[in-house]
Image: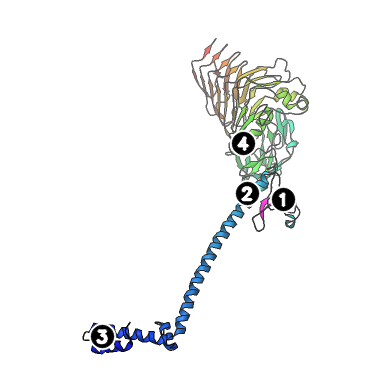
Amino acid sequence: MASIIELIKNIRNARLGKDVRENIASAIEQTYEDAAKQDNANMEVVQARGTFDTLNKRLNNSDASKADKNEITTLNNTFENLIRNESNSRKEAYINLQNQINGLANGSPLISNSISEMTDTTRVYLLTTNGHWYWYNGNEWTDGGVYQSSGTADNSIIPSLTSFIKEQKNSFDVNGFIADKYWATPNELRDGTYCYYFPTPVKLKPKTTYYFYDIMFYYNFCWLSNESKTSYIKLIDAVNNNTFTTDSENIYLYITLREMLNDGLLIAEDDFSPILTKNSEYVLKNKEFYCGNNKQFKKLKDAVEYAGQFSNATLYVDSGEYDLVEEYGAEFLNNNNVKGLELKNGLKVIFMAKTKVKFHYTGTNAFIKREFSPFNTGKYGGSLENCVIECSNCRYCVHDERGGSLDSYVNTFKQCEFYIDNSKNEDWNYQEMSVAGGFGLDGIIRYENCVFDKPSYYHQNADDSQTQSKCDVYFINNVVNKGNFHVNSGHSSMPISKFFACGNITKSEIPSTGENTNVKSYLFNNAIL
């Protein structure tokens, strides 16, 4: 490179501007270089500070840049650690959860008297002080709530623990009824068969609405009276749609029943939703049940009684013979007044092929001989399908008695056979009946493809308590081996009931109605063999 002297000379002698600029720049560079070679520190500092005012600013800027790089590196490392820790935490939580599942799968939880005694983090513990179960979440023991290892025990749920059942109590002791008398008026008792009266009046609340539930009132012989019995009215005249409302004076109820109560509810104030009676007769949702040797119910009696608690339940019964004398027990029947199984709340009982229900009573209880039937119909009705009923020394195969009942109901019998032998039954006057009963307020009764070995009879007598009772009776494609199927309504003031009979075969006379009755008959294609 040229010396500084030559460069200065070139500057002075240059004719073109570009030559002048180039020589000036070269001269300056040469000056810095010469100064550095001669250990001129000031010149070296000037070159080192570059575009900054001082070398210190240049150095501070360099330190800041390094700090920024270090901070970025630190943040990157921190972020990577967070990701790594989060992954480990999730993995640990998963392992803890899997341990709890494994702990449950290994059996019952470990028992502990305090949280401090819980040492195995892979297991579930049951704390004795509160009955709660605990699991380890990775950091601490977590309360899992009340522990139930065996589910809800039978009869452990009571109405007060639910929001959908309201418990009601009887207004009197149901065991206090006396047989074979009735209240002719609140001032007079008379003798009468098949009726039961309560000896003291039930005091009700004034101006309060009451509801009848699943009972058999003898309405013509039930009275609302004042305390002195100088003013009274028949209960039938106060009832409207299953309810009645007391006035301010006639608040004493004198009761006569057509049938004896077991332990069901008789009267409830009209703020129920729904009713739960003493014997747990409450209406819930549809359900299916099964009866047979390897099913949830072994006895037909138990299955029908349980399934009948539910609305529109279906009970499937396996093939075989079901002996009701054995199921009830001969000793029990000799010492207790029961009427048999009840079809109610729309219960549908479906029997498999070749199934027979038997009841051959050989005991001495006159009530059983007079009142027991293998099947009885109750509130809202029920149905039987594919069943052979064979019985002796009892009332009927089916007692479809709804006289005085205020509910609407449907009773259906399909592909059933009814056989009864009452030739030795001296305690029941109407021996030659397979099925029989009385009309309720508003019912539908159907018999289809059934076989009867004895006559059958439905009626509504003039002295029945509910004079507005009427029903539609359908008798379709049946066989009657002896006698007839007869429908009778014995009072001209009653609503007209209807009797439809079609395609039936009898051995003596076609299905019929009584003379001068309020039954409209529709008879088609019936034959006598």
For disc 4, the marked residue is: 310
Q: Are marks 4 and 3 in contact (CB under 8 Å)?
A: no
Amino acid carrying label 3: it is Val
- Spatial CA distance of label 3 from label 2 is 86 Å
At label 4, counting other C-alpha atoms closer than 10 Å, the crowd grade (few under 14, some 14-19, many 20 or more) is: many
Which residue position holds label 2? 98
Residue with the most extreme top position: 529
| Residue type at the position of mark 2 | Gln
Does label 1 or label 3 sit earlier along the sequence? Answer: 3
Relative side of 254 to 22, left or right: right
At x 62%, y 51%, the residue is: 95
Q: Are marks 1 and 4 in contact (CB under 8 Å)?
A: no
Is 336 or 403 nearer to us in this picture?
Answer: 336
Q: Give yes or no for residue 141 being in the magenta stretch.
A: yes
Query: Which one is in front in this view, the residue at disc 4 or the one at disc 3?
Result: 3
The boundaries of the magenta stretch are: 132-154
Q: Is residue 80 above or below residue 193?
A: below
Q: Give the residue at the far left of this rendering.
A: 15
Mark 1 or 3: in front is 3
Q: Which residue is mark 3?
A: 20
Three-letter residue code for mark 1: Leu
User: How far apart are the alpha carbons under marks 1 and 3?
Assistant: 98 Å
Amino acid type for the residue under numbered disc 4: Phe
**Foreground pick, 451 / 43:** 43
Q: Position of residue 406 (x, y in %)?
A: 59, 34
Numbered disc 4: secondary structure: loop
How far apart are the alpha carbons under marks 2 and 4? 41 Å
